[in-house]
Amino acid sequence: MNKNHYILKTYCDKIFLVGSGNFWYQKTESRNDKTLLYKIYSCVLFFTYGFMTVLEIMAAMMGDFPEDEKRDSVTFATSHTVVMIKFISIIKNKELLKTLNRKMMMICEAHEEQTLMDEMYRTVKINVVAYCVAVYGSATFYVFEGLRKFYNGSHFVTIVTYYPSNDDDTLAATIVRIATTLVLLMMLLTMIISVDTYTMAYLIMYKYKFITLRHYFKRLRENVDELVAAGKARLAAEKLAQGLVEGIKMHNELLSLSKDIDKAFGTVMALQLCQSSGSAVSLLLQIALSDQLTFTMGMKIFFFLAAMYLLLALFLCNAGEITYQVCTSIV
């Protein structure tokens, strides 16, 4: 099993587990998203995400909360609305992504170098781990900040929703606050696996396809030079002609793949740019307007910004690297 196959299959397995459906191009009984039980699981999960987001929007627009909770409600309402649109965008393109998964594995497969694939896998792994640490680091400090408020005589809160209100300290309100925190943690997991790191992994794999193609042309040139030096000019010409035809064919296949990648992930990347800009302004205003910025409050903002800008940087850097590799792959 090559690294592209392993990465994509692993992602499809995890995406299935978090309720987003079966993205694998081969039908298997273990990943059947057409069963009634799975449909109920998926609908309940995403309805819960959507309902919580609606409550966050209502809190931001109509809720009567202290200034810090009001700013948190605006931040979460904005961010989670964007996340829900990302979910819809990815799930809507599920059939396209099934085809993309197959193409991504097949193109250039015969010419992939093990060392290059190991480097690609290591790059994906490091970036995924770094992003997960940033996302759950932020979530952890939101929980710590909620616990700090609780031990200081207030109520525990992480996600600010329209219900419960600020002065509601009943058992039902406490249960809802804890439940929304658990929903947040699950929503982040779905976001990481189904959308953000899935998109990032695709960009990295696509980049390494062009690097593989560039290495292919480099080896072709070296082989032709060796044949010419050995006095086998006719054999060198035939090998060059055959190699160029195959290389140009792979290059065209990769270029055609870019249209499908843009269709499948373009909305996600565009929304990430908007989310990073909008949420950054909101969070920086929190820092500027907070009279007493505690350590946990500062850290939750830091990790939140780190997660957003890390993902945006990974999207932009890999997109730029793809452009560079496209230009140099046939030079």
Image (tube, grey):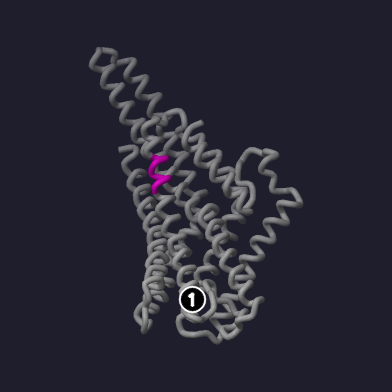
219 or 56: nearer the viewer: 56
Magenta span includes 125: yes
Q: Which residue position is annotated with label 1? A: 151
In the image, residue 150 above or below residue 323: below
Residue 78, percent across and down? Answer: 51, 72
Which residue: 61% across, 83% down? 168
Q: Is residue 224 above or below residue 194?
A: above
Q: Give the mark count.
A: 1
* Image quadrant containing the C terminus: top left
* Image-based side of 31 in relation to 308, left or right: right
Give the residue drawn at x 60%, y 81%.
169
Task: Determine the main secondary structure of the stretch shown in magenta.
Answer: helix
Relative image position of residue 44 (x, y in whole percent) = 69, 61
Mark 1, residues whose alpha carbon is within 10 Å: few (<14), some, or many (≥20)? few
Q: Is residue 299 above or below residue 250?
A: below
- Give the image location of residue 121, x and y in percent: 42, 40
Q: Position of residue 154 (x, y in %)?
A: 51, 81
Callout 1, which amino acid? Answer: Tyr
Q: Residue furthest left?
A: 229
Name the foreground residue: 238 vs 92: 92
| Outermost residue, top side | 231
* As drawn, 152 above or below 299: below
* 315 part of magenta stretch: no
> For numbered disc 1, what is the local secondary structure?
helix
Q: In the image, what residue occupies the spot 40% across and 30% down?
A: 114
Is 23 left, or right, of 104 in this rendering?
right
At 63% from the left and 38% from the top, the residue drawn is 26
The residue segment tinted magenta is 120-126
